[in-house]
Image (tube, rainbow, N blue to C red):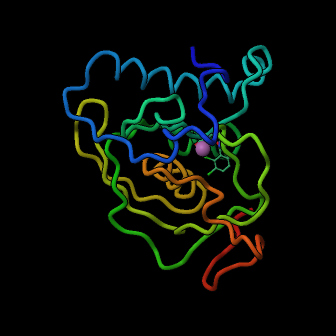
Amino acid sequence: MILMKDIVRDGDPVLRATAQQLDFPLNDETKQLAHDMMEFLVNSQDPKIAEKHQLRAGVGLAAPQVGQSIQMAALLVPGEDDEILLQEVIVNPKITRSSVRQAALAEGEGCLSVDRDIPGYVPRADKVTVRYQNLDGEEKELKLKDYPAIVIQHEIDHLNGHLFYDHINQTEPFSLPKNTIILS
Ligand SMILES: O=CN(O)CCNC(=O)c1cccc(Cl)c1Cl
Ligand code: NI
């Protein structure tokens, strides 16, 4: 199972690289990594398992965060109560449409690869259309809005060498670009 010791931290060049596209069929190692990444998210969101293994909670995990510079990320976005808004492993994702309207989470963002809290709004597109391949290589399209849209953009950023704080206004961290809404 993936543990916090396996998570690469800011400063490692892998987090600033553009990850490699994957060809299909995926080899067994890549498929195993996909399952391990999703298992980490499930574990990190289970209070007992997270406590036992001292896992920081995550709603997404990108392969570069475990040292694999490949275009793959796992998403496990919970909704109200025990509803799951999004559970998917995405390969070779591309944002094909993004709204002019932007959104930022009221509480800012955090990242397993960034050990410090960095306060500030992270403005992102409020709606995105993402084309990607699933683990079987099938072309899929996701249209997301608000929180799930924010999360998938955080993950796709990881695949392109960006970290959430790159988007925070350095002089005015809580300034809001026009047409940006705050999501609570
Ligand atoms: O890349 C994934 N991580 O670093 C996992 C830890 N961070 C989160 O779960 C997280 C927290 C807040 C806002 C967003 Cl958008 C995300 Cl993604
Ligand atoms: Ni992250």
- Please say if 56 is above or below 176: above
Residue 101 placement (x, y as % from top left): 54, 78
Residue 70 placement (x, y as % from top left): 37, 36
Please name the residue shown 19% across and 26% down the image. Answer: 25
Q: Quadrant of the N terminus?
A: top right
Please name the residue shown 35% across and 21% down the image. Answer: 31
| Quarter of the render that holds ligand 1 | top right
Residue 166 shows in this picture: yes
Please name the residue shown 39% across and 47% down the image. Answer: 18
Out of 84 and 178, give the one closest to the viewer. Answer: 178
Residue 83 shows in this picture: no
Residue 173 placement (x, y as % from top left): 76, 70
Question: Along the horizontal axis of the image, is 107 left or right of 84?
Answer: right
Question: Along the horizontal axis of the image, is 101 left or right of 49?
Answer: left
Residue 66 placement (x, y as % from top left): 52, 28
- Please say if 19 is above or below 35: below
